[in-house]
Image (spheres, rainbow, N blue to C red):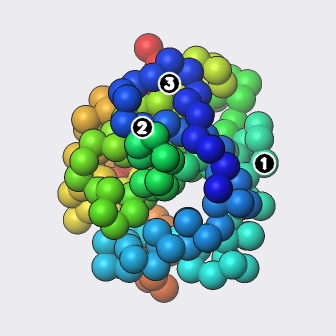
Amino acid sequence: MVACAALGPAAGPAVAIRPVAMSDERAFLAGVARSGQLHARWVNAPRSAEDFARYFERFSPPSDFGFVVCAGDVGHLAGAINLTNVVYGAFRSGYLGYFAFEGFQGRGLMRQGLHRVVRHAFEALRLHRLEANIQPGNTASIALVQACGFRREGFSPRYLKIGGRWRDHERWALLRD
């Protein structure tokens, strides 16, 4: 596993974020395996070495970034945060996706990690807008974006295909200013 190092000033002593690495495969897949019930309706996380390789290959800056959230000094993987479809120019926007691993949810680690990714997006990448699309019943994810200052902007019926079904999503956004 690659050691976790903070991007930017520390948001709290318990959390670091860093780009996902191929060397994370074993720990990442173990986290996904123990998180089946946690993720069931909400996310299609990679479940095999082949899935992880495809997941890793998706991240090609400057348009797509994958981060892991690391807990504690030893760097246990607590979850993942993706910043994708970044558009620069007049739009300066990107989309966020995230998930915690079982045993790390509800402890504020993802909130700290998301704050750090948001800061990176607004300060280092100079983005103006971030958007997260969340299924209406996913109260934990909605609470997370609310805690990070996102505001609900709308509703998109049958927006994303997750678990083999097209699912409705709420659109949550955060502006830099």
Residue that appears at 50% across and 47% down? 75
- The residue at which mark 3 appears reads as 119
Residue that appears at 45% across and 23% down? 10
Quadrant location of the C terminus? top left
Picture quadrant of residue 78: bottom left
Give the Cα distance between marks 3 and 1: 19 Å
Q: Nearer the viewer, mark 1 or mark 2?
A: 2
Residue type at the position of mark 3: Arg
In the image, residue 170 lies at what x, y percent? 33, 54
Q: Residue furthest bottom?
A: 164
Residue type at the position of mark 1: Ser
The disc at residue 60 is 1
Give the Cα distance between marks 3 and 2: 14 Å
Picture quadrant of residue 125: top right
In the image, residue 165 lies at what x, y percent? 44, 82
Residue 105 visible in the snapshot: yes
